Amino acid sequence: MKKLTSILAAAFLVTIASCSDQSQKTEPKKSGKLVSVLEFKGNGKMQSDVFHLSGNTAAIIYKYAADNPYTGNFNIYVMKKGDDINTVGGFPVVSSSKLKEDEGKSTLTKEEGDYYLLVNSNCNFYINVGDMQ
């Protein structure tokens, strides 16, 4: 009986310890101030510099304008540093085919790490990536 009590007490302590470890994990910040971590502009298919995201809520603010009023193809991929879209694939976080021009904001939920943008466009574009601080 004494052995069973010791085993149950040990199991109880392990359970309490694992519960307290989970409560110490912090949730990503969803409110605060967006701080710019990347400004990127160009035309065509381009890759940005590497930038760091903290794991908090982030956002991509974009604007594009086509020289031709019948054009409007714009896609933004967020890639983890070291990944190649031809190897790992990917889905655009922003995809627009609105003719002539478009602008908007897209929320990102990425874990902390280093990333880069891959843009496929036939328009002049401006992108700002903000990380919640």
Image (cartoon, rainbow, N blue to C red):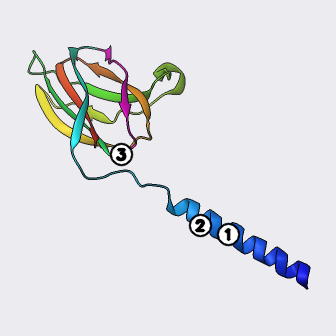
Q: CA distance from mark 3 to mark 2?
A: 23 Å
Q: Residue 126: where, in percent of width, then height?
A: 17, 23
Residue at the location (49% across, 20% down)? 84
Compared with 104, 122 (above or below) is: above
Badge 2 marks a residue whose secondary structure is helix
- Total count of labels: 3
Give the answer, above or below, for where 74 lies relative to 122: below
For disc 1, the marked residue is: 15
Looking at the image, which is closer to me, 2 or 43? 2
The Cα–Cα distance between marks 1 and 2, rounded to whole angstroms, is 6 Å
Tag 2: amino acid? Cys
From the viewer's perspective, is 112 left or right of 99? right
Crowd rating for badge 3 (residues with CA inside 10 Å; few <14, some 14–19, many 20+): many
Secondary structure, mark 3, is loop
Whole-percent x, y for residue 70 in the image: 12, 21
Image quadrant for the C terminus?
top left
Left or right: residue 65 versus residue 82 is left
125 versus 57 height, above or below: above
Which of pointers 3 and 1 indicates the residue nearer the eye? 1
The x and y percentages for residue 81 are 46, 24
Mark 1 touches mark 2? (CB < 8 Å): yes
Would you say the residues marked 3 and 1 are in contact, meaning their CB atoms lie under 8 Å apart? no
User: What residue is shown at x 13% (from left), y 32% (from top)?
Assistant: 102
Check residue 19 in the rendering and tell me which mark sits there, or answer none: 2
In which quarter of the view is residue 64 placed? top left
**Residue 24, disc:** none
> Of the residues shown, which amino acid type is indicated by label 1?
Thr
Q: Which mark is residue 56?
A: 3
Per the model, the C-alpha gap separating discs 3 and 1 is 29 Å
Specify the segment rendered in magenta. Answer: 45-55
